[in-house]
Image (tube, helix red, strand yellow):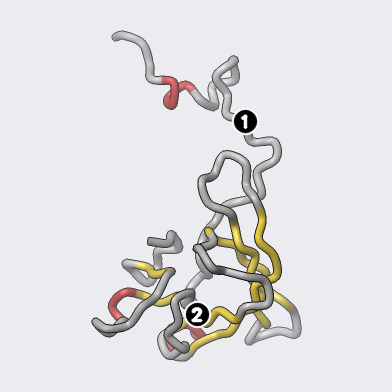
Amino acid sequence: MGRQIRGQRKGRGSVFTSHTKHRKGPGALRALDYAERNGYIRGVVRELVHDPGRGAPLVRVQFNSPYKYKKINEQWTATEGTYTGQFIYCGKRGAASLFSSRIRTWLHSNRSFCYGNMHAFSRVDI
């Protein structure tokens, strides 16, 4: 059979476990809802967080919930030039800036964007 690769041995409970003590959480885009499919939703960058073991920092974005009186906190990987207090627009009709989030089928050929999904149900960023 041969030996397993070290990446395959992580999580087995021996000395080859991954070091996840100070991790800050997964970096995923917003779950697509009605506000993003048909319009846009605006979020504010609250903080930039260093996540150990990750090449890029995480950005924590706060949205107002369109359905209840509460705040929704999301985090995804930060890009170069992101700062706290910055507005980020997520959705089909959001303002197209370098840091906005859209689905690739909704993009025009001459628009610049940073966070995009290949499919509507995918939360991973490209």
Relative to 15, residue 11 above or below:
below
> Residue sitting at 47 percent across and 21 percent down?
9
Q: Which is nearer the N-term, disc 2 or disc 1?
A: 1
Q: Position of residue 122 (x, y in %)?
A: 40, 63
Q: Quadrant of residue 5?
A: top left
Q: Quadrant of residue 12?
A: top right
Residue annotated with mark 2: 90
> Residue sitting at 43 percent across and 90 percent down?
93
Question: Quadrant where the C terminus lies?
Answer: bottom left
Q: Is label 1 in a helix, a strand or a loop?
A: loop
The disc placed on residue 19 is: 1
Question: Quadrant where the N terminus lies?
Answer: top left
Q: Quadrant of residue 112?
A: bottom left
- Name the side, left or right, on which 67 lies relative to 124: right
Relative to 100, residue 20 above or below:
above
* Circle 2 residues within 10 Å: few <14, some 14–19, many ≥20: many
| Amino acid type at image mark 1 | His
Q: Position of residue 117 (x, y in %)?
A: 37, 68
> Residue sitting at 54 percent across and 44 percent down?
54
Q: Is label 2 in a helix, a strand or a loop?
A: strand
- Name the side, left or right, on which 100 lies relative to 47: left
* Circle 1 residues within 10 Å: few <14, some 14–19, many ≥20: few
Q: Position of residue 75 (x, y in %)?
A: 60, 62
Q: Position of residue 90 (x, y in %)?
A: 50, 80
